[in-house]
Image (spheres, grey):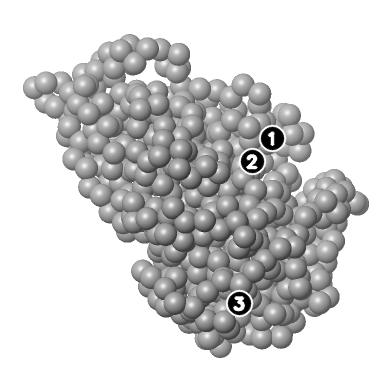
Amino acid sequence: MITRYSTMLRAALAGLLLATLAACGGGSDTGPNGGSQADGVVLHRGNGTEPNTLDPHQANGTWENNIIGDMLIGLYTEDTNGEPVFGSAVDHQISEDGLTHTFKIREDMTWSDGTPVTAQDFVFAWQRILDPSTAAPYASLIYPFKNAAAVNAGEVPPSELGARALDDKTIELDLETPTPFLATLMTHYTTFPVPKHVVEEAGDDWIKPGTMVTNGAYVVEAWRPNSFVKLVKNDNFYDAENVQIDTVFYYPTDDVSSAFRRFRAGELDINACSQCYPIQQVSWIDQNMPGVKHNEIILSFTYVTFNTNVEPFDDARVRRALGLAIDRDVLTKQVTRAGEVPAYNIVPPGIDNYVDTPPQMAEAGWTQQRRNAEARRLLAEAGFDENNPLTFSVKYRLAGDRKQIMVAMQDMWRQIGVEAQLEGAEPKVAYADYRARNFEVADAGWVADYNDPQNFLFLVEGDTGPINYADYSNPDFDALMDEAAMTMDLDARAEILAEAEALMLPDMPIAPIYFSVNRNLVGLHIENWNDNVQGIQRTRWLAINEAKRKTY
């Protein structure tokens, strides 16, 4: 049957504005210094953190998503507003019960080496990410696929996955449950195809420059670790004639102050990450660089996670005490100051398919003084006081303003008589430790993979795997999540998801701090950059207008 997806996609595609103005920029394998006419129109993008990988089955960060999403394209992709539109697919049919989906792939789609993209490339990719030997950190994202969880657990072989290539250009996908967010999920890199003919020959080396082939707008030409990743236009991309930028460099920009200087000097056209300019420079930027600061409200939150495998964080009283002592108003108004919203639950406002009034922590309306008193009471009940003070370590990401935030939280915890030792680590190191549960308490953040509350609540589901950093498991919570997954009525589903969140919040396996804002810097010469709640801006839609370029 034809569904609302088809109507939505036709409308979105019909209204899509493509770039019409572009001019040449310098570029070379050495990055922003120097240039080459062969590079054509060049974009220099600050990207936050050095990628661990370009393999969509090993990636787990937004900084990797930005690069991978420029090179590979799923059945759906994002338009200029971050909304799902057809990518590799041209048609999507859904059965009456919502459990069987049939996709038609573009007849003209090839890999960058000219090999046709087939339905089997998608099926092969989905089987590969779920294969236990792949050890994909994000495999649970596609558990809505029939038998996906069982495949990932090694209970059945990958061939038992509910995905079939009916012919070279037709995929039939069975789901475990109706999945209202499937179109958006299919824009995520975990669902992207991989070139079966290359992966089978090259193995894990398939992502190396010169070996990797892609089906998206760009292909990797060079990767110099801790320096840049260079992508060049894929002339075999189905929409190549409308891609205005020929070359894009992605740079790690963990050092926000250094990146800010590079942006001012014109070495970076864009610095796009979660915290991409020094917060102490906000007033100066507003006065001297009007129009370049993009404080983008996105579906994201920042939180503290507790390792429930480690004493005393297996005690909900201790977790709640530490969560209550965080003064979210002070952090957002005096430390971050970019429009972040204090968070007393984990599902952000404005998300699709949720209740109008989400549940919150019971203490949300209290004064901070009252919260601190309750925190001290809970600690005392758990056996901690001035004679037996709680001490613990907090691992945090060395990026943006994280250190200032963590120092402020350290002071807040001291007010309830506990001492936190701060341990900073590069983001990719920190997240590796989180996945390995090598921490007591940790600072973390989450950006939506798709616009649905399930994508936040699943962070604390028992079967989520590596990214359930808290290792939280609550059978009652999991049962509600399972019930929601089987509920086709969206209003009823929203109520069940809200019930699940309300049940989990008092346990506080993770303590929400604030709903996040992307602090991006975008040059005035960059056209077609549209802020959106997904925080996704693919290079294929952008253009450069040299007449508007400025340095500061």
Vertical placement of 247 versus 116: above or below?
Answer: above
Looking at this view, is 254 or 508 the one in front? 254
Answer with mark 2 or mark 3, whichever residue precedes in sequence. Answer: 3
- Residue shown at the point (50%, 53%) measured from the top left: 272
Left/right of residue 89 with respect to residue 243 in the rendered view: right
Label 1 sits on what residue type?
A: Asn
Answer with mark 3 or mark 1, whichever residue precedes in sequence. Answer: 3
Looking at this view, is 234 or 493 the one in front? 234
Left/right of residue 476 with respect to residue 196 in the rendered view: left
Which secondary structure lies at badge 3? loop
- Residue shown at the point (52%, 74%) measured from the top left: 26
- Kindly identify which numbered label has been placed on residue 353: 1
x, y percent for residue 213: 61, 80
Classed neighbour count for the residue bearing mark 1: other residues with Cα under 10 Å, few (<14), some (14–19), many (≥20): some
Which secondary structure lies at badge 1? loop
Which secondary structure lies at badge 2? loop
Left/right of residue 500 with respect to residue 326 in the rendered view: right
Residue 76 appears in the rendering: yes
Classed neighbour count for the residue bearing mark 3: other residues with Cα under 10 Å, few (<14), some (14–19), many (≥20): many
Looking at this view, is 461 or 141 the one in front? 141
Answer with mark 1 or mark 2, whichever residue precedes in sequence. Answer: 1
The residue indicated by pointer 3 is 40
C-beta proximity under 8 Å, tags 2 and 3: no
C-beta proximity under 8 Å, tags 1 and 2: yes
Label 3 sits on what residue type?
A: Gly
x, y percent for residue 467: 45, 50
x, y percent for residue 423: 22, 47
Residue 138 appears in the rendering: no
Cα distance in 3D space between marks 1 and 2: 6 Å
Label 2 sits on what residue type?
A: Asp
- Kindly identify which numbered label has been placed on residue 452: 2
